[in-house]
Amino acid sequence: MKLNINPEYQKLLPRISQEEWDTLKSSIKTDGLLYPIVVNQENIILDGHNRFLICNELGVPFQTVVREFIDKLEEKRFVIEVNLKRRHLNDFQKAELGMVLLEVEAELARQRKIGTLMEGEKLPLAPIDAIGKAAEVVAKKIGLSGRTFERAKKIIEIAPEQIKKKVREGKQSISSAYSQIVTPMKKPKLEIIREEINSLEPDSFNELKNILLILVGFLERHKILKEEKNYLNKLLGKVHSARKG
């Protein structure tokens, strides 16, 4: 049977380590495939991407189980939830999957709401408390406390990629990274700019750009001090000009 890989589903899941790959490969080589590969009606893999690749590499036969879903959102939710249960993920990796799950849950809720509207009614905006409840539900599904999920969510939304990479790889805790990106925001914004710029090496263009973009985004989200936001945008323009020069 020819199975297909959906790149979107494959990218949702963190790659397993080489050690995990070797352990799984050794198990399949010795005992065969213990868990069938889950596919949809189109033979697209939903659960078992690594098992499928190893079986093909070793020439080991495999079984499949077909799961049917009423729509692609339900299918995507299954892909996330089954891998949360099966894979050994750290808390931040769970939170990253949780963010995708939160989007899926929000869209499913929106569709359910549309289904209950009378003709001519408009779909109201989701209240803040409803969004908060959805986050609590997702946090429970991924096995994190609401506080940990909210902190990880903030890191995913505003932290530079180098910080996210450290937390994702287990080199920095969620709590430490959260303090690193949030605590400085309690200081006056221009003071943050001066401190960060003074700490940079002469060739740290990308770091400087990231700092400015993060601060501009923060000010825009919180509608704080337009003159400081304008100052940051002008400074970012000067940095680009100097870089080109």
Image (spheres, rainbow, N blue to C red):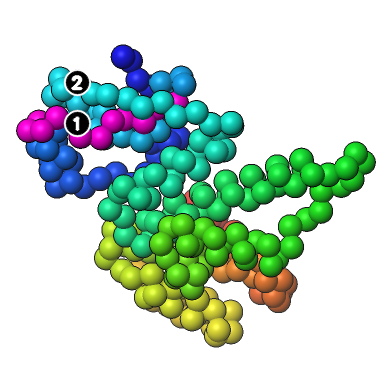
* Residue identifier under label 2: 61
Would you call the spot at circle 1 few (<14 residues within 10 Å), some (14-19), or many (20 or more)? many
Say whether residue 57 is left or right of residue 11.
Answer: left
**Residue range highlighted in magenta:** 29-40
Say whether residue 8 is left or right of residue 110.
Answer: left
Residue farthest top in this picture: 1
> Looking at the image, is 179 positioned above or below residue 160?
below
Point out the image quarter for the N terminus.
Answer: top left
Expressed as whole percent of the image width and height from the top left, the position of residue 196 reads 45, 75
Quadrant of the image occupied by residue 187: bottom right
Distance from disc 2 to disc 1, alpha carbons, whole Å, reads 8 Å
Quadrant of the image occupied by residue 92: bottom left
Expressed as whole percent of the image width and height from the top left, the position of residue 81 reads 43, 47
* Residue identifier under label 1: 33
| Residue type indicated by callout 2 | Pro
- What's the residue at 39%, 56% (across, down)? 94
- What's the residue at 42%, 65% (across, down)? 144
Quadrant of the image occupied by residue 130: bottom right
> Looking at the image, is 32 positioned above or below residue 196?
above
Q: Is residue 110 magenta?
A: no
| Residue type indicated by callout 1 | Leu
Expressed as whole percent of the image width and height from the top left, the position of residue 162 reads 37, 60
Q: Residue 45, which numbered label?
A: none
State yes or no: discs 2 and 1 in contact (Cβ < 8 Å).
yes
> Looking at the image, is 148 positioned above or below residue 59?
below
How many marks on residues?
Answer: 2
The first of marks 2 and 1 along the sequence is 1
Would you call the spot at circle 2 few (<14 residues within 10 Å), some (14-19), or many (20 or more)? few
- Disc 1 element: loop
128 vs 36, nearest the viewer: 36
> Looking at the image, is 229 positioned above or below residue 7?
below
- What's the residue at 20%, 34% (across, down)? 34
